[in-house]
Image (tube, rainbow, N blue to C red):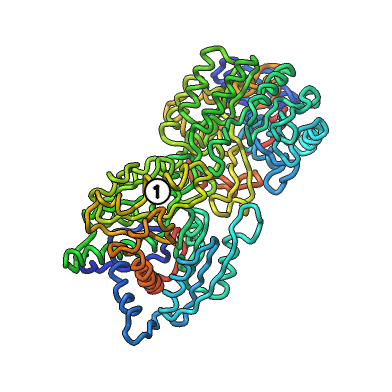
C-alpha cells in the first residue's frame, strides 16, 4: 500500500464496506498498526488516552460474544467509558422503537454507538437520522464491515511477510470464501472489501447456500471446493449454522463435510502456503478440520487479535472526523 | 340546481367518445351531453380532460379495526382527490368482513362518512383462514361486489376450487392474491441481485407465478371468473395471456408502482419500497407495460395500503407491506405510460374507468345521458411534485415523495356532487 494519499476520514459512521472507496479502506488499514503496537506494549500497559472521556455504547440487539468483547476491549484500550446494552429484536413483541431507544441513549451523551442487529439496514436507518457515530457490528445478512477490515489487515500482514515487502498490496491475491454465503454478512463485507483492494474472490458452497446473481458483485461462483481452492492464496471458511439442515439447505453435516470441509485431504489441491482463515466461532471438524485449524497456516487467532486493533483504528478515525457529526438528513437540507 | 361542465375534452372509453363536449348534470345523473349547453352552475373545463369518475377495484380503508391508518371517510377523500368516484374495499380489516352483519356495518359507515361510492368485497373464507367458505349468497345480498381473501392466498387447492365454484354460483368474482407461501416464509423483497446485495430475504417471482398458474387452472376446471390481483412479473403476465387465449375466464390488474419502480428502489432500506408482491426488475416493468398496451392486463388498481408513519419507521424486515396510491395513480399513469407513448390517453382512462368496472360488473365508469353523474376533470399537462403532507389520506407511506409528475385532478364529481375541487 502506497503511503496514504492524504486521505482524510470524513464519514460520521461506518455502516458498510460497499460505500467505501479504496482510499478510505486503506486509510483504516494504515491506521491500525499503531494500535497493534499498543496491545503489544512490553510494559503491559495496553492503553492510550485517545478516547478519554468519550462514551462508547455497545448495543447488541442480537446475541454475540466475540464481536462484542472485541469492541469493548478496543474502546477500553482507547480509554473510553463503555456501556453495554442488550435488547431483543422481535417484530412480534411490540417494544420501544429502535429510533426511540437510540434517542434515549443519546440523551446520556453517547459518542459512538456500536450496533449489532438481526435486520439488514438497521445501522443505516439510525445513522441517517441520529448524530451519534454509528459502527455496524453486523446487520442481518447484510454487512459486518469491521470483520472484513480485520480480515483484510490479516491478509496484508501475511502477504507482506511472504513477499518481504512492507508495501505489498492485495492486488491479484486470490481469496476463496467457502460455506454458507447466502446468510453471511461476513461474506458480503469481504466481497466488497477484497474486490476494492484488487483481490480476486471466488465463492464456494452448496447451491442452496449461494445467493442468486452473486457474480454481479464482481466475484466467481462455484460449487466445487477443489476448483475454488486450487489456486487460492487465502482459504476462508465460513461458519455453518447447524440448524440450516432443518431448513432443507443441506442434507446432513456428514455430507457437508464430505463436500466442503477444509482438511488435509482437500488441501492437497491448494498451494502449500495458502492461508487459512475463519471468522469464528469454529465448528471444529465441520468447516475446518482440527489439524488445519491448529496448523501454522491458520491465522484464526491472529484475526481475533487484529480485530481489536482495527476496531481501535475505526473508532479513532470516526471521533476525529473533521466534520461535526451530522446526519444524512441534515446534510440534505 | 344544474351543473354545466363547459368546454372540456370529453373522453368516455365506454362509448368511444373523445371530443369537445359540454356535460349537463341534473341531480345525481347526467342530463345532457353536447355543445352550447346551459346550466345554473358552470365549471369551465377549457384545456381539461373530462372523463368518467375513476374506478379502483383494490383499496384498503382499514375500517373497522385500524382507523389510525385510514378510515372510510379519509380513504374516500383521498380517492376523490385522486379523481376516483368508485372504489372496491378489501375485506381484510379487523375483524375481516366475513359475514353479512359486518358487511352492513361497512356499508353504513360508507353511507355516513364516504364522499364517493364504496363497493365492498367480502371474505371468501371465514376469518380469511382459508378453511371454510363464507355465506357468499347472503354477503352478496348484503352488498358484496366480489369475494377475496386478499392479503393472502388460499393455500389449499381443495378449498380454492370449492370457493371458485360456489362464488360462481353466486355470480361473484373471486379476486386472487397469488402467493405460494411455501416457497419462502421470511421474504421481504424481490429475490435477485438486489436481495443478494442487501442481504434481505427474497421472494422469488415463482412465488407469485406458481400461484397464478394454479389459480387459473382451478378457474379453468370450475369455469369460474377469477381476477388476478396486482400482477408483477413478466412470466405471470405471460401465463395470463395464454389463459385468455384459451378462453379461460381470467382478468387481472396491476398497480402504478409496478411499472414505475424496480427493486433497486429498496437500496437504502426505505420501508416505503416494501410491498407484497414486491417491486420486481426492469424486465418485468417492460412486460407490464407491454401487457397494458396489448390488453392482457385489464385494468389499473392501486392496492392503496395505508400504514401509520410509526409502523413504517422501523427496521425494513419488521415494517408492514404496502403503500398508498390513490392520490398518485392517475399522474403516474399519465407520466409513465401516456407521455412516453406506451398507451394512449383514451386507453389509460379506459384502464381506470369502464375496464375495472366491467371486471366486477359495477354500474359505473361511463358517461351517458341518464347515467350516474360520476365525473373527473383533470389537466393532463399540469406538472406537480408529490408532497405526501398534502394528501387527504390519513397515511403518508408513499415511495413517490418529491417525484415530479404530470396530470393533475381539478374536480371530482360523484353522484352530481362536487367531492373534490383543487
Q: Is residue B245 above or below residue B127?
A: above
Q: Quadrant of the C terminus of chain B?
A: top right
Instruction: Evaluate whether residue A293 shows in this view.
Output: yes
Residue at position x 74%, y 37% in the image: B96
- The one of B358 and A1 positioned closer to us in this rendering: A1
Residue A191 as seen in the image, left or right of residue B325: left
Q: Is residue B244 above or below residue B422?
A: above
Q: Is residue A259 above or below residue B238?
A: below
**Residue A78 placed where, x, y %?**
41, 79
Find the residue positioned furthest to the bottom: A43
**Residue B408 placed where, x, y %?**
55, 36
Hey, which quadrant is residue B11 in on the image?
top right
Hey, which quadrant is residue B249 in on the image?
top right
Residue at position x 34%, y 87% in the image: A43
List the residue tagged with mark 1. Answer: A257
State the SS at label 1.
helix
Amino acid at each position: 500500500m502506497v503511503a496514504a494519499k492524504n486521505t482524510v476520514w470524513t464519514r460520521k459512521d461506518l455502516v458498510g464496506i460497499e460505500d467505501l472507496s479504496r482510499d478510505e479502506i486503506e486509510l483504516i488499514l494504515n491506521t491500525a498498526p499503531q494500535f497493534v503496537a499498543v496491545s503489544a506494549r512490553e510494559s503491559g500497559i495496553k492503553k492510550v488516552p485517545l478516547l478519554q472521556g468519550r462514551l462508547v455504547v455497545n448495543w447488541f440487539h442480537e446475541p454475540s460474544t466475540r464481536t462484542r468483547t472485541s469492541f469493548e476491549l478496543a474502546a477500553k484500550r482507547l480509554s473510553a467509558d463503555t456501556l453495554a446494552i442488550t435488547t431483543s429484536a422481535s417484530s412480534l413483541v411490540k417494544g420501544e422503537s429502535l429510533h426511540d431507544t437510540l434517542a434515549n441513549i443519546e440523551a446520556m451523551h453517547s459518542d459512538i454507538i456500536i450496533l449489532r442487529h438481526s435486520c439488514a439496514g438497521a445501522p443505516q436507518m439510525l445513522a441517517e437520522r441520529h448524530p451519534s457515530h454509528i459502527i455496524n457490528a453486523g446487520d442481518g445478512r447484510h454487512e459486518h464491515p469491521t470483520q472484513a477490515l480485520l480480515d483484510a489487515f490479516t491478509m496484508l500482514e501475511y502477504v507482506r511477510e511472504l513477499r518481504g515487502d512492507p508495501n505489498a498490496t492485495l492486488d491479484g491475491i486470490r481469496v476463496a470464501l467457502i460455506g454458507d454465503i447466502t446468510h453471511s454478512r461476513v461474506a458480503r463485507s469481504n466481497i466488497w472489501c477484497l474486490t476494492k483492494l484488487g483481490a480476486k474472490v471466488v465463492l464456494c458452497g452448496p447451491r442452496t447456500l449461494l445467493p442468486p446473481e452473486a457474480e454481479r458483485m464482481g466475484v466467481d461462483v462455484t460449487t466445487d471446493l477443489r476448483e475454488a481452492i486450487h489456486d487460492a492464496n487465502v482459504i476462508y471458511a465460513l461458519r455453518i449454522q447447524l440448524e440450516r439442515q432443518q431448513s432443507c439447505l443441506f442434507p446432513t453435516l456428514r455430507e457437508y463435510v464430505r463436500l466442503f470441509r477444509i482438511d488435509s485431504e482437500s488441501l492437497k489441491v491448494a498451494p502449500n502456503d495458502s492461508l487459512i482463515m475463519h471468522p469464528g466461532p469454529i465448528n471444529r471438524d465441520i468447516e475446518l478440520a482440527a489439524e488445519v485449524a491448529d496448523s501454522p497456516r491458520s491465522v484464526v487467532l491472529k484475526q481475533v487479535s487484529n480485530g481489536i486493533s482495527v476496531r481501535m483504528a475505526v473508532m479513532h478515525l470516526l471521533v476525529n472526523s473533521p466534520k461535526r457529526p451530522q446526519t444524512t438528513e441534515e446534510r440534505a437540507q | 340546481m344544474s351543473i354545466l361542465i363547459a368546454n372540456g375534452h370529453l373522453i368516455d372509453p365506454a362509448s368511444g367518445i373523445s371530443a369537445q363536449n359540454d356535460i349537463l348534470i341534473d341531480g345525481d345523473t347526467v342530463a345532457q351531453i353536447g355543445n352550447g349547453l346551459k346550466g345554473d352552475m358552470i365549471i369551465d373545463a377549457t384545456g381539461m380532460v373530462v372523463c368518467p369518475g375513476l374506478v379502483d377495484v383494490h383499496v384498503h380503508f382499514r375500517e373497522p379495526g385500524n382507523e389510525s391508518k385510514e378510515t372510510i371517510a379519509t380513504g374516500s377523500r383521498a380517492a376523490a382527490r385522486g379523481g376516483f368516484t368508485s372504489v372496491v374495499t378489501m375485506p381484510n380489516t379487523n375483524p375481516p368482513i366475513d359475514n353479512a352483519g359486518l358487511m352492513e356495518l361497512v356499508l353504513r359507515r360508507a353511507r355516513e362518512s364516504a364522499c364517493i361510492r364504496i363497493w365492498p368485497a367480502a371474505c371468501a373464507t371465514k376469518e380469511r383462514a382459508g378453511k371454510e367458505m363464507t355465506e357468499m349468497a347472503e354477503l352478496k345480498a348484503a352488498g358484496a361486489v366480489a369475494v377475496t381473501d386478499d392479503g393472502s392466498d388460499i393455500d389449499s387447492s381443495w378449498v380454492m376450487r370449492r370457493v371458485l365454484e360456489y362464488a360462481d354460483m353466486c355470480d361473484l368474482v373471486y379476486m386472487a392474491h397469488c402467493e405460494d407461501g411455501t416457497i419462502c416464509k421470511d421474504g421481504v423483497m424481490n429475490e435477485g441481485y438486489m436481495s443478494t446485495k442487501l442481504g434481505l430475504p427474497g421472494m422469488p417471482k415463482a412465488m407469485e407465478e406458481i400461484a397464478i398458474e394454479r389459480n387459473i387452472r382451478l378457474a379453468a376446471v370450475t369455469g369460474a371468473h377469477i381476477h388476478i390481483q396486482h400482477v408483477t412479473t413478466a412470466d405471470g403476465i405471460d401465463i395470463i395471456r395464454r389463459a385468455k387465449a384459451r378462453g379461460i375466464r381470467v382478468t387481472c390488474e396491476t398497480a402504478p408502482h409496478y411499472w414505475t419502480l424496480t427493486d433497486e428502489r429498496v437500496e437504502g432500506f426505505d420501508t416505503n419500497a416494501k410491498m407484497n408482491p414486491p417491486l420486481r426488475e426492469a424486465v418485468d416493468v417492460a412486460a407490464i407495460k407491454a401487457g397494458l398496451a396489448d390488453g392482457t392486463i385489464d385494468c389499473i388498481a392501486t392496492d392503496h395500503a395505508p400504514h401509520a408513519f410509526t409502523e413504517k419507521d422501523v427496521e425494513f424486515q419488521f415494517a408492514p407491506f404496502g403503500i398508498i396510491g390513490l392520490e398518485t395513480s392517475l399522474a403516474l399513469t399519465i407520466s409513465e405510460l401516456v407521455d412516453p407513448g406506451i398507451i394512449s390517453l383514451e386507453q389509460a382512462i379506459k384502464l381506470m374507468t369502464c375496464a375495472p368496472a366491467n371486471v366486477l360488473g359495477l354500474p359505473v365508469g361511463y358517461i351517458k345521458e341518464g347515467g350516474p353523474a360520476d365525473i373527473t376533470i383533470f389537466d393532463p399537462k399540469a406538472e406537480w411534485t408529490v408532497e405526501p403532507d398534502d394528501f387527504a389520506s390519513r397515511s403518508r407511506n408513499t415511495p413517490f415523495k418529491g417525484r415530479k409528475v404530470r396530470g393533475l385532478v381539478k374536480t371530482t364529481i360523484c353522484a352530481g356532487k362536487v367531492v373534490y375541487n383543487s
